[in-house]
Every structure is written in C-alpha cells, then in structure tokens.
Amino acid sequence: MSPLLILCFIGLYFGGLLLIAYITSRNTSADSYFLGNKASPWYAVAFGMIGDSLSGVTYISVPGKVGAGHFSYMQLVFGYFVGYFVISKVLLPIYYKMNLVSIYTYLETRFGRFTQKTGAFFFVLSRILGAAARLYLAARVIQLFVFDQFTAFHVPFWVSVSVILALMLLYTYRGGIKTLVWTDTFQSLFLVLGVILSIVAIIHKMDISFGQAISHVVHSKYSETFFWDWKKSNFFFKEFIGGIFIAVAMTGLDQNMMQKNLSCRSLGEAQKNIFWFSIVMVIVTFFFLSLGAMLYQYYDFSGIQIPKDATGKIISDKVFPNLALNYLGTFAGLVFIIGLTAATFSSADSVLTTLTTSTYVDILEYDKNTTLSDAEKKRRRTIIHIGFAVLMWLVIIVFDILNQNTIIDTVLVIAGYTYGPLLGLFAVGLFTKLNLKDKWVPAVCVLAPIVTYCIANYGKPYMGGYEIGNELILLNSFVTVVGLLAVKRQQEKAGLVA
C-alpha cells in the first residue's frame, strides 16, 4: 500500500479533529477546559470513553494475544463490568456531592494536603507511563508501515512521534474537556468501525458467510474463555477479581476517566453514562477477540507466515498490522490505519488535559491562588499542558529503546503497581473512620509497590508455585492499607465515609 495514500487519509482524519476542535473551543473559559461547563451529553461521554479505555493497546495487542491466551481476556472484562457498577453507585455520588474538579481533592478533605498530592502523583505517574505505552505501540506501527516506507528520505521514529504529539496539542490545549468529549466520540466511532470492517474484510477474503465466520470462531480452540488452574495467572477468579479492582482504580480513581464524567449535567446522567459504557465495553471487546481468532485462522487458511522473533516466538503485536497492511488489500489496510489513528490520538489526547488538571489543581494549587490573573492562570495551564507532551515524548523514546513487544501486558503491570496505592488510599477513606498522619502517607505509598514487587517476583517458591497475575493491583492495595494502618492517628475523628 502506498505510504502517501495512508498519509492522505491520516491528514483527512486529522482535519476532522481540527474542525471539531475549532467549533467546540470558541469562547472557552477555565470551566470549559476543566469540566466542559457541566454541559456534556451523557451519551457522548459514554461513547467517547470507549476510545479512552480501548486505545491502541486493545486495537493491536488484544487480537494478537488471542493466539496464546485465547478468549481469556474476557474474564478480565467481566470483572470490569462489576467494577463499573461500583464506580456508578459508590464513587460518582461522592464526587458529585463534593462538586469536585479533581477527584484527588477528596483525599485532601479526608486526610490532608500530603495525601492529596500523593494521590495526584501516582495518577500522573501511572498515566504518563500507561499513555506513553499505548501511544508507543500505535506510533511504532505507523512508523513501520508508513514513515519507514519513504525510502527517498529517512524519517526517524522520534520525528514521527514528535509530529503526532504536536498534532494532539493543536486541538487540545485550548478547549480541554469541552473539546475532548466530542473529539473522543469521533475517534471511538472510527475505532469501532476499524474492528468491524476488518472482520468484514477477512470474511470476504476467506469467501465465507457471516454465519460461517461465527461458527469458525465459536468452534475454534481460540474461543476458550474460562480457565480454572488456580496456580496460573489466567485463573478465572484471578482475572475476574483483578478486573473489578483494575476497573475501579483505572476508571473510578483515575482523573482522566472521571473528569469527563464530572462534566455531565447531573449525577443521574453520569451514572447512565457508566451503565451504557460498561455494556458497550463488553460487546466491543468480544468483537476484538473474535477478530483475533479470525486473524489466526486466516494465517492458517492462506499459508502466510506469522511474524516471529529470532527465537521463533510469535510477535503478537505484529499479527494484526502485518495482515491488514500487507495481505488483505487496500480497503482493509486503510480501515486498519484509520482505526489505528483513532486509537493513537484517543489514547493520549485527553491524558494531556487531565494531567494538566491534576497538576494545576492538586500539586501546584493554582486554582486557589488569588494573586494570579485569569490570563496568567491560562498561560501557566498551557505551559503545563505542553510540558506533559514533552515528558510523554521522552517516555515513548525510552519504551522504544527497551523494545517492548506485548504492550498490553506492560500496561496492566504498570497499572498494578501505580494504581494500587490509589486504591488503598480511597479504600481507607471511604470505608473507615481512620485519620492518618498526613506527612507519612507519601512514604507508605512509595514503599507499598516496592514490597509488592518483591512478593510478586521472589515469592513464587514460597507460595507453592502460585503465579500472581492481574490480582497484582489487589495485593498492592492491601499492602498499602496495611502501611496506612501503621500511620493512623491515635485519636480518631469522624471523617467523610461512604
């Protein structure tokens, strides 16, 4: 496929984003940037969250992992569904009752400023690493199949990543959440179309009916969903319970996901948004896994060599791109690129805004500074926004040096270590009346992931061969809670509890 044709389609897609940004960012204010004037339609927020949650990781890694993991990923997603219910009924009512801009303001109200800044720090750390990992995956594919094809001149990876981040800055730095609600809705549409039309392309190439395609997937070895070996990392209850806590932490305790929910007109609309988002999330993930099964079946059907490394191991993150761009034809290739482009932008654009919000409100507390003019506050907000884009660029370059092959595993491991302390902090705040020694909280939350890492990596011989999987986040939060109990105040006072 012509790299120039691909670039033209990416350009058209970006033109659509700029148009939406232009329309939505006119006459914006600080309230528009942070909470979209509390006027975001729930259905737009719900659909836009799909792109935020799935991103390039789901688009490429989830189908690729079907070869080895089959449909085991659905066990995690079923846990997500329960976790979203907890968010809707427990967390959102508290956030709306307190009229929050940043959800970590809750931690200040409950425990103090050091705890608030600790929560914000772990959010910033987790989102910088997670968003960079997602963006790295998509940018690497674009680099391989687009920029590396221009043999007349060399376009290094750092340049292509710089261009992608610069384009994101163009449509996010002014409008903030008000713009992102609609650009993410636009991107989620193309992300979902990407997987559906890719399935259609494979069905056409294999010359089978839609009913036959369903039968092939259902009766294949890849459709195995539930796994019951309790020692393995894919054991059902590990995945399911891990999914519940990952959803609560990565969505309900994550400023990036909650800021859009807080921009809805009311608590009822925000809860409606979470309800429908959770249902659509399960359905769309099933389509991604079905696509993965069909990809591997098409490799067998056509006799095409599956991408492997020097040791003969399948490179799962190249399974989908290789087929879509080299063997399925121009239509499938363009569908893949547009879906990937949607994943690329949706995986990082809102992160820049919400990282800016948390830093601006929780860490630097510019919102409380009455000596700064509105113009100066806006200037500092813009500087922070651009600064995070530069930082994300640096992290992506590090990922490239490390040469990560299966990014979805990387993202989930990062989540386990960085969201665990957040989960522990909110658990103590919501479900106990304990008060903490505020200044000691940062030390506890830094030590907890270190202790968890030691248990996860060196404790297997002492646990009868038990492998820690996605329940890592639960272990980390438990260690955090134990540490927080050690720094509780002797005289407890009633706090804000659920």
Image: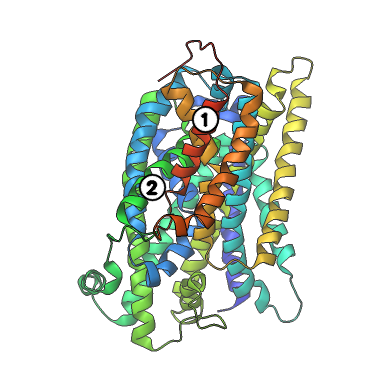
Q: Is residue 181 visible?
A: no
Give the percent coordinates (x, y) of residue 297: 33, 78
State if disc 2 and disc 1 touch (CB < 8 Å).
no
| Image height of 450 relative to 85, above or below | below
Residue at which label 2 appears = 243
Quarter the N terminus occupies: bottom right
Residue at which label 1 appears = 425
Give the percent coordinates (x, y) of residue 395: 69, 54
Q: Is residue 172 visible?
A: yes
Residue 400 relative to residue 425: left or right: right
Give the percent coordinates (x, y) of residue 318: 51, 73
> In this view, which residue lies farthest toward the front?
462
* Pointer 1 local density, CA inside 10 Å: few below 14, some 14–19, many at least 20: many
Mark nearest the camera among 1 and 2 is 1
The residue lying at 58 percent from left, 69 percent from top is: 141
* Pointer 2 local density, CA inside 10 Å: few below 14, some 14–19, many at least 20: many
How does the figure colour the protein chain or chains? rainbow
Q: Earlier in the sequence, mark 1 or mark 2?
A: 2
> In this view, which residue lies farthest toward the bottom?
303
Identity, as a three-letter code, of the amino acid under mark 2: Gly
Give the percent coordinates (x, y) of residue 394: 73, 55
Badge 1 marks a residue whose secondary structure is helix
The residue lying at 50 percent from left, 42 percent from top is: 476
Badge 2 marks a residue whose secondary structure is helix
Where is residue 387, by image quadrant?
Answer: top right
The residue lying at 59 percent from left, 74 percent from top is: 145
Closer-to-camera residue (473/397): 473
Residue 232 relative to residue 402: left or right: left
The residue lying at 46 percent from left, 32 percent from top is: 261
